[in-house]
Image (spheres, helix red, strand yellow):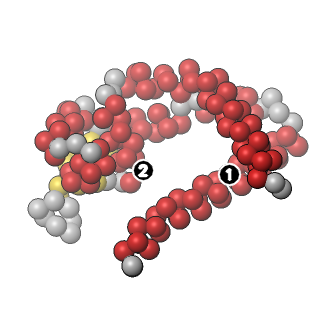
Amino acid sequence: MADEDKDRLIAKIMETQRRLQYLFAHDRSNPLFDAHLTMPQLKILLMLGAGGGASGQELQRFMGVSLATVTGIVDRLVAHDLVERHEDPHDRRVRRVVLTAHGRQTVERIIMAGTDRQARVLRRMSAPELEVIVRATELLVTAVEADVAEERAEPVAENLH
């Protein structure tokens, strides 16, 4: 397949995805508005949800702000019972920030928002149509996993030189 054909198909997929995002936006935005989180608080919660926990220094690097700023954000998240601090089992000088049960539920609600509507929409489709979507999403997940693995391997390869 010629590069221009691939580019045309990619552009069509991206436009369709954009349309879907707007159609599902209302369902997905409700948990964000209900949570009453600032953008920095949301970023930290999502990072912790993906990684399982982080030190203050890791959060500082991730956020690109001062340690004092991170401490203030984490203090507010602790006050709302979304995160808690624990001693790092490998280094007692380090405090790790992890999600509480309430924090995990909040992240889950945000990440999974819109799934009820998505399931309702998928039920409108025939079994053969659903099989096409299953195959397409499996292919997409495989490509994303390969991209993530390559991205993670790049810094390691750079350190070897």
Give the x, y percent position of residue 155: 41, 67
For this view, does 5 lie left or right of residue 46?
Answer: right
Residue at the spot 37% in from the left edge and 47% down from the top edge: 47
Residue at the spot 83% in from the left edge and 33% down from the top edge: 125
The secondary structure type at the circle numbered 1 is helix
Q: Quadrant of the C terminus?
A: bottom left
Residue that label 1 marks:
140
Q: In front: 57, or 82?
A: 57
Give the x, y percent position of residue 115: 61, 33
Residue that label 2 marks:
50
Residue at the spot 30% in from the left edge and 35% down from the top edge: 40
Say which label, 1 or 2, has the lower sequence index.
2
Give the x, y percent position of residue 110: 46, 33
Q: Is residue 118 visible?
A: no
Q: Label 1 to label 2, Cα distance in Å?
A: 19 Å
Q: Quadrant of residue 107?
A: top left
Give the x, y percent position of residue 52: 36, 54
Question: Contact, CB < 8 Å: mark 1 with mark 2?
Answer: no
The vertical placement of 146 against 100, above or below, is below
Q: Quadrant of residue 80?
A: top left
Residue at the spot 64% in from the left edge and 23% down from the top edge: 23
Q: In front: 116, or 66?
A: 66
Q: In front: 149, or 72?
A: 149
Dot 1 amino acid type? Leu
Disc on res. 58: none
Q: Quadrant of the N terminus?
A: bottom right
Crowd tier of the residue under label 1, counting other residues whose Cα lies within 10 Å: few below 14, some 14–19, many 20 or above: few
Crowd tier of the residue under label 2, counting other residues whose Cα lies within 10 Å: few below 14, some 14–19, many 20 or above: few
